[in-house]
Image (cartoon, helix red, strand yellow):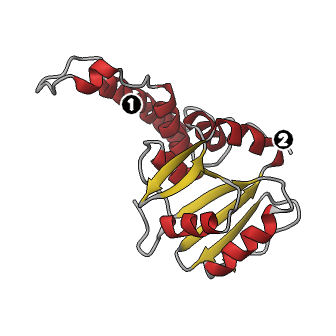
């Protein structure tokens, strides 16, 4: 679900028009890769490149960006409220090269293109965030095999075979639902990996 007044394509077009180097991640990156559209911001990972900063600054000025909240020197995220919605800029120097190498230049809509992180990288990044539900949805997309050519062109059957792609996804989601129910009841504990800095 997109927030009213949120225009992510304008944000991405503004970044593109100034030649800002970045990789699109987060909910919008997942949506471009086929995930559910459930975002209210644009998340990008920036390279550790001093020449990229003036281009980013011009883009932020054009977008009417205001710093959302002060950050400490140790934060890897800076958030801006722009005229078209929220923009989160992440600096992950150890991650950028891998993200960029696995990313693809994709059209995100209305002729706007962006470098979008791979599904595997999106799922890996999401697992380190507090958004457990989003991590599960992305992992289901990653681990579900892509449709074959035959599946794509096969006629739609009123009664599809059991164990089809949708059935596999629903089964994984049912397992996730059972897991989350156990966590909510206190029957199972969550274990989070600490981020290495």
Picture coordinates of residue 45 (x, y %)? 70, 53
Picture coordinates of residue 152 (x, y %)? 28, 26
- Which quadrant of the view contains residue 171? top left
* Residue carrying label 2: 196
**Measured along the vertical axis of the image, is residue 150 above or below residue 59?**
above
Picture coordinates of residue 95 (x, y %)? 77, 42
Whichever of labels 2 and 1 marks the residue nearer the N terminus, that label is 1
Q: Secondary structure at mark 2?
A: loop
**Looking at this rendering, what residue extends furthest in the left direction?**
158
The residue depicted at 59 percent of the width and 70 percent of the height is 14
The residue depicted at 24 percent of the width and 25 percent of the height is 153
Which of these two is toward me, 27 or 33? Answer: 33
* Residue carrying label 1: 174
The residue depicted at 61 percent of the width and 68 percent of the height is 17
Q: Is residue 84 visible?
A: yes
Q: Residues within 10 Å of mark 1 (few under 14, many from 20)?
A: few
Picture coordinates of residue 150 (x, y %)? 28, 18
The residue depicted at 47 percent of the width and 51 percent of the height is 107
């Amino acid at each position: 679900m997109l927030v009213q007044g949120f225009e992510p394509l304008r944000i991405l077009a503004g970044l593109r028009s100034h030649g800002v180097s970045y990789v699109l991640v987060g909910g919008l990156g997942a949506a471009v890769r086929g995930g559910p559209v459930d975002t209210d911001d644009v998340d990008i990972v920036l390279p550790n490149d001093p020449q990229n900063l003036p281009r980013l600054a011009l883009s932020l000025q054009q977008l009417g960006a205001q710093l959302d909240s002060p950050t400490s020197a140790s934060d890897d995220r800076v958030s801006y409220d722009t005229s078209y919605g929220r923009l989160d800029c992440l600096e992950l120097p150890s991650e950028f090269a891998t993200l960029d190498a696995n990313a693809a230049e994709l059209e995100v809509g209305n002729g706007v293109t962006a470098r979008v992180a791979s599904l595997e990288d999106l799922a890996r990044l999401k697992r380190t965030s507090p958004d457990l539900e989003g991590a599960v949805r992305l992992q289901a997309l990653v681990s579900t095999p892509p449709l074959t050519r035959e599946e794509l062109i096969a006629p739609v059957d009123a009664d599809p075979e059991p164990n089809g792609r949708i059935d596999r996804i629903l089964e994984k989601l049912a397992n996730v639902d059972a897991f989350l129910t156990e966590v909510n009841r206190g029957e199972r504990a969550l274990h989070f990996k600490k981020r290495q800095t």
